[in-house]
Image: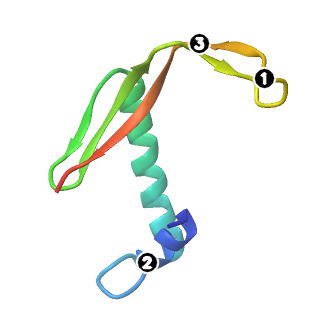
Amino acid sequence: MSKGKLIDAMVGPNKFATKREAEQAIEIFTDTIKSLTSSGDTVTIRGFGRFEVKQRAGRTGRHPGTGEEITIPAKQQLAFSARA
């Protein structure tokens, strides 16, 4: 589902009154998740899931155009785990 479709789904009776309000809510949510996880916190929402930053190890890969072997550096990546 795209962000636009999510906004459309959040507008209606017993939901947000306008698309602008729904968009602002999504922006606030994503900005808050980004700022908390970038400072090293894990964000857990019971019944929904957990957002955390995981360390990915460096590895060797191949350049798709030339087939040349390249080194892919280690990096941090935001991960989401869904909870039932």
Q: Which amino acid does label 3 sit on?
A: Pro
State whether residue 1 is above or below residue 81. below
Precedes in sequence: disc 2 or disc 3: 2
Frontmost residue, 32 versus 59: 59
Residue closest to the eye, 60 or 5: 60
User: Residue type at mark 1?
Assistant: Gly
Q: In which quarter of the image is residue 4?
A: bottom right
x and y percent of residue 14 in the render? 29, 83
- Mark 2 to mark 1: distance in Å? 45 Å
Q: Earlier in the sequence, mark 2 or mark 1?
A: 2
Residue type, mark 2 in image: Ala
> Which residue appears at 54% of the width and 63% of the height?
3
Q: Callout 3 environment at 10 Å: few (<14), some (14 to 19), or many (20+)?
A: few
Q: In front: mark 2 or mark 3?
A: 3
Q: How many labels does the image show?
A: 3
Give the vertical position of 27 relative to 58 (above or below). below
Residue identifier under label 1 = 67
The answer to whether marks 2 and 3 mark residues whose Cβ atoms lie closer than 8 Å is no
Marked residue nearer the N-terminal end (3 or 1): 1
- Decide if residue 33 is on the left or right side of residue 61: left
Name the mark on residue 9.
2
Report whether 46 appears left or right of 57: left
In this view, the mark in front (2 or 1): 1
Expressed as whole percent of the image width and height from the top left, the position of residue 70 reads: 70, 13
Rendered-image quadrant of the C terminus: bottom left
- The residue wearing badge 3 is 73
Nearest the camera: 42 or 84?
Answer: 84
Seen from this angle, which residue lies furthest bottom?
Answer: 13
- List x then y, in percent, for residue 37: 37, 29
| Secondary structure state at the residue bearing disc 2 | helix
